[in-house]
Each structure stands twice: as structure tokens, then as C-alpha cells.
Amino acid sequence: KSLTSADVRQMYLDFFKAKGHEVEPSASLVPHEDPTLLWINSGVATLKKYFDGRVIPENPRIVNAQKSIRTNDIENVGFTARHHTFFEMLGNFSIGDYFKEEAIVWAWEFLTSDKWIGFDSDKLAVTVHPEDDEAFAIWRDKVGLDEERIIRIEENFWDIGEGPSGPNTEIFYDRGEKYGNDPQDPELYPGGENDRYLEIWNLVFSQFNHNPDDTYTPLPKKNIDTGMGLERMVCVIQGTDTNFETDLFKPIIEATEKIASVKYGEKEDLDSSFKVIADHMRTVTFAVSDGALPSNEGRGYVLRRLLRRAVRFAKQIGIDEPFMYKLVPEVSMIMVDFYPEVKEKEAFIQNVIKTEEERFHETLNEGLAILSKIMKEETEKGSNIFPGTEVFRLYDTYGFPKELTEEYVGEAGFTIDEDGFKFEMEKQRERARNARQKTGSMQIQEGVLGDVHVESEFIGYDQLQTQSKIVE
Ligand code: ATP
Ligand code: MG
Ligand code: MG
Ligand code: MG
């Protein structure tokens, strides 16, 4: 079948609409009234109000295509076929209505029926929780799946700490031996670290409450929460090597080729640059469209880091000047039908990105020169540790996010002195605190002194990750 990404998204919504679901629009990437989350990172994240009973939905069956940002997969982005920082999650939800059987049987129907996606059912395998005999039996008896293709895996339990939790079942598409055929590879199984068995859909059965004392009691109402990665589905359907050759990314890569000194596909290691740029472009474009702006804290720091990371990868393919802002129209064109707001805000988004790129470029080369100089000095001393004070100086003066420095020097075999960096950050915080105390009695001047005394609320990237990992 030849389907576009827009077709697949629409088919999913239509399928579940036909099964009595209410179609909810994609919510903003910036969470509202949810301080535990940095970004909306899944379909269910915007529906928590229904899951925890704060709001009773008119229709207990909901379907959506939700924009999501995850930073926990960033190291993988550009290097695996399937990870993004921004992606769309297609999900169907039951709030105390249908449960395991319908969720599984409908998922199978959507994937394998010729009226819908029409996958060859021999290509699919699933995982279930070892103790979830019920799900196992549904797959075997109602769906008719071979027992060998129902794998019991311990990790199949969805738990976010306090709140609804429960076992889940995941669906994998076997892309064939071309993507892994080493029988000795311990990771080559559905759920392992490989690009062959592609995890396309996660069905969560929230049936327990995780209590504050870490006990689990059955929920009065059982819910269904599912998530399917649109980009991965489209990759399988369009038969591409990675998600990046699908119609969701290809135009961005082609536009990048026009500015770069090499072509995509010419050199494998340089392809990663194109992928990182295409990925980060989408994230930044959508995040700014939803109201986030680059800065040194929280969400803004993530954006700053993504933009600067893209600039770093762009250098490798011969792009040495601000260019990302030029790719915004590509992103908005691909997404315009379902997300017209991006097209509407195009000029604003371009402006934000261009300004941030220019700021970084002003100091980039200077920063890079310092970086090489320090590494040379350390090498001469027989050390391969990049001093924390220098990591801080690069961050503070040259706008190099710590992680960026880490990646740069990592390529030369260096590690950074984390403790030293943390120490410098703490000192800076201390200075800011003192400065604020001093100005406390001079309220009137605060407006003027504001620039000088802004406290950096940098809380460390690790922490940002934990925050955004909450529903995983
Ligand atoms: P993975 O194991 O591949 O990292 P996950 O198990 O963390 O995925 P879930 O939390 O189960 O992902 O999310 C539901 C679905 O969303 C996944 O089955 C996948 O199709 C998609 N998905 C999750 N993370 C990403 C990502 N970083 N990029 C693209 N798609 C993703
Ligand atoms: Mg993951
Ligand atoms: Mg997984
Ligand atoms: Mg999963």
C-alpha cells in the first residue's frame, strides 16, 4: 500500500472513531497545570485529568494524535532508525470503559486488516508481562497469534510512581534479517536494543493504583492507554531504512542538502548530521510554535541545547552559518494539514531561531578554539579530563551547554570533570543569591539591575531528563 504519513494519522483517528471514540485535538507541547512534566511526552500526558478522575469525559473512549517531546532518547537520535526528540504519538484511550480484549483485538484489526494498514501478520510479534496470562490468552486465542510470537518480558509493567499503573503489551514489526541476523546478538529480540524488531505500539492496561506506601491495589475502574509512534509506522509502511527517509523528514533533509557541501547517503557517518538536524528542526519549530523560547533554564534550555547541537552537526557537513531558520517552512509545509498553526506562526518561529543561531555563531569559533587549546594542554599533561572550570567558562561566556562541550570533547576521547563544573555552577548561584540580597532593599532599582542579577536556574540536564521521563 502506498500511504502518506497524513493518511496513516487520519486512518488511525478514523478507525477508532468508527469504534465509538471521540477525536481530541493534539494539545500544546507545553504542559498546562502539570508541574511534574517539562514537556508533553505521550498521548496520555494530556489526559491525566480523566485518568485520575478529576474530570469525567463525556465519552469514555478517546483517540488522539499527540505531539510529544522526549529528551531521554537524545543520544540515540540520528544514530538509530527510530528515535526522535519530537514525534507524534497516536493513541486510543478507555476511561473505565473497554479493557484488554477490545484494546488488543482492535489493535490487531487496525494493523492487519486490508481495509486498514494491512500488515502481513507474520511480521508481527508481541511482548506481555510474565504474569499477565489474560493478555497472553487474548493474543493466542482471540487473535490467533502463535505462542512463539508472544514473548513474556519483565519490563512490561507501566509504572510512574504514585497513581495508575499496570501491565502492558507491546507490538513489534520484524523488518527482516537485513536489520539484524546475528543469532549471537543478545539484544536481537522484540524489546531489545535493535533496529530489526521495531516497537510500534504500546498498549497499557492501567488496572492498579500504586499507593504512597508502594503497595498496589486494584483500581475501581480499569483504563486503557495506548501509544503508537507515527514515524515508525510510516517507516514500515513506506519501506524506508529509517524514519528519516519517510515523507515526514525527507523534504527537510533535501532542503539541508542544498545548503550542505555533501549529499545525504554519500557517507554514512555524515548522514547522522542530516538526521540530527531534521529531528531537532521539528522539535524546535513545534516547541516555539507552542510558546517555548530558548533560554538558560527548563524548557528553554532544552531548546537552546537542541539548536546548538544541530549547529554542531551542521559544521560536519560544511554548514558554517545560521541556516536552521531557513528550514522552518519545510517543517510547516509537511505538517500544515494537521498542524496549521505552525504555518501561521512561521515568521515568528524563524525569527526566534535565527536570533538564537546568530547569538551562538558570534561566539562559536572562539569557543571551539578554546576547547582545542585546553584539550591540547591537558593532553600534554597526560590527562584526558576536561576541567570543570573550563566547562563552566564555555557555558557562561560562550553559550556552550555542558552537554555540547561533553559531546565535542568526547569525540577526542575526553571526559569532563562533572564535579568541578557543578562546583562552579553552585558558586555562580551563590553570587546571584548575594546580589539579590543586596538589591532587596533597593526595590526601585531592580528593573535596572535586573540584567546584572539574573539568577541562572540551571538545574542540570540529568534532572531535566528525570522530569520528562515521568510517564515512561
Ligand atoms: P523505545 O523502547 O523504542 O525507546 P518506548 O518503549 O520508550 O520506546 P513508549 O513509552 O512505549 O516508548 O511510547 C509508545 C510508542 O511511542 C512507542 O511504541 C514508539 O512507537 C513511540 N516512541 C517512543 N519513544 C519514541 C521516540 N523517542 N521517537 C520516536 N517514537 C517513539
Ligand atoms: Mg524510550
Ligand atoms: Mg520500549
Ligand atoms: Mg514502549
Image (spheres, rainbow, N blue to C red):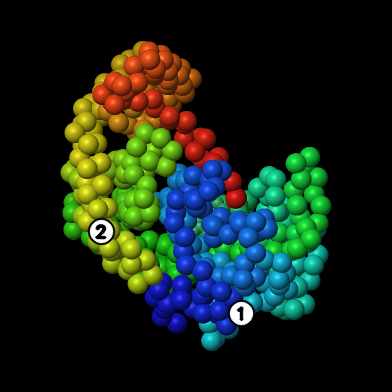
> In which quarter of the view is residue 257 placed?
bottom left
Look at mark 2 in the image and give the residue it sits on: 346
User: Residue drawn 42% across and 42% down?
Assistant: 299
Q: Position of residue 288 (x, y in %)?
A: 34, 51
User: Residue drawn 31% across and 21% down?
Assistant: 444
Mark earlier in primary sequence (1, 2): 1
In the depicted view, which residue is nearer to us: 413 or 456? 456
Q: Is residue 407 visible?
A: no
Mark 2 secondary-structure assignment = helix
Question: In the image, 34: left or right of 279?
Answer: right
Residues under numbered marks 1 and 2 in contact, where contact means CB atoms less than 8 Å apart: no
Mark 1 secondary-structure assignment = loop
Residue furthest front in the image:
444
Q: Please state which amino acid type lies under the numbered disc 1.
A: Gly
**Eyeballing the image, is 419 above or below 14?**
above
Instruction: Tell me, for residue 20, which label it has, or none.
Output: 1
User: Residue drawn 27% across and 63% down?
Assistant: 344
**Eyeballing the image, is 235 above or below 386?**
below
Question: In the image, 267: left or right of 94?
Answer: left
In the depicted view, which residue is nearer to us: 50 or 38? 50
**Eyeballing the image, is 256 above or below 408?**
below
Q: Please state which amino acid type lies under the numbered disc 2.
A: Glu
Quadrant the N terminus occupies: bottom left
User: Residue drawn 52% across and 73% down?
Assistant: 23
Q: Position of residue 140 (x, y in %)?
A: 75, 74
Residue furthest bottom in the image:
115
Q: Is residue 261 visible?
A: yes
